[in-house]
Image: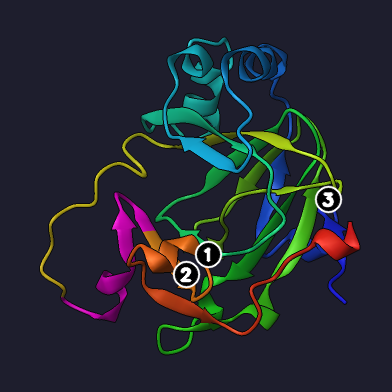
Amino acid sequence: MMKIYSVTDKEFAPYGKVLEGYDVKELMKALDESTPLPEGVGYVPSVAALEYTNVFGKLQNNAYGGMPIQIGYCNGHNTKLNCLEYHRDSELNIGLGDFILLVAKADDIVDGKLDTSRVMAFKAKAEQVVEVYATTLHYAPCNAEKNGWFKVIIVLPKGTNGPVPEITALNAEDKTLRACNKWLLAHKDSAEAGEGAYVGLSGENIDIADIL
């Protein structure tokens, strides 16, 4: 049975870390009051109400070293893996409440496929600023409770998850490019696979509902 670790456990070290020193209370208030809670999962890359908060400059200048960033959200209800994605840079996740991340390592991709037995689960506490490394495969957060929900801030370099660029494929990885700065491996049973996403996950489409 899959074990749910904490993002403060040593097991999380290869995947990311918790960033200290950020006051996110205003950001959490904006997330709570300005974003919806859909029945499924909703993601918006950039939201003015979240970006016009006092922590924006610190996240951009301290956490990203001055790179232009965007602050959006991923909200809803979810217990399934469905897909894994990665970017060319770290992503920050900050939850209004507790949430769970399902993650794997990019170096576990073999010949364009990743076995879901390599996936691990990590719980983040409310208001923890969780950095997910560029080499960490991840996707939508999961509920931390069986009938729970999540509202999670998503911080990324500006433009990420925007329109996919028009490219001529040069290698196998190019077929997984799903949006700007987003490479995605879908499970065959996911909605994304039905929409034409590259099927790169083999094994079980993990559902953590029974272990919450």
What residue is shown at x 31% (from left), y 37% (from top)? 159
Q: Quadrant of the N terminus?
A: bottom right
Q: Label 3 sits on what residue type?
A: Thr
Residue 51 placement (x, y as % from top left): 48, 17
Q: Which residue is mark 1?
A: 83
Numbered circle sitting on residue 8: 3
- Front label number (1 vs 3): 1
Which sits earlier in the primary sequence, circle 1 or circle 3? 3
* Residue 39 sits in quarter: top right
Residue 177 placement (x, y as % from top left): 30, 63
Mark 2 Cα-neighbour bin, 10 Å: few <14, some 14–19, many ≥20? many
Q: Which residue is mark 2?
A: 186
Disc 1/disc 2 C-alpha distance (Å): 4 Å
Q: Label 1 sits on what residue type?
A: Cys
Which sits earlier in the primary sequence, circle 1 or circle 2? 1
* Residue 120 sits in quarter: bottom right
Residue 206 vertical position relative to residue 28 in the rendered view, above or below:
below
Q: Secondary structure at mark 2?
A: strand
Q: Is residue 172 located in the magenta-colored stretch of the structure?
A: yes
Q: Over which residues does the magenta segment extend?
A: 170-182
Q: Secondary structure at mark 1?
A: strand
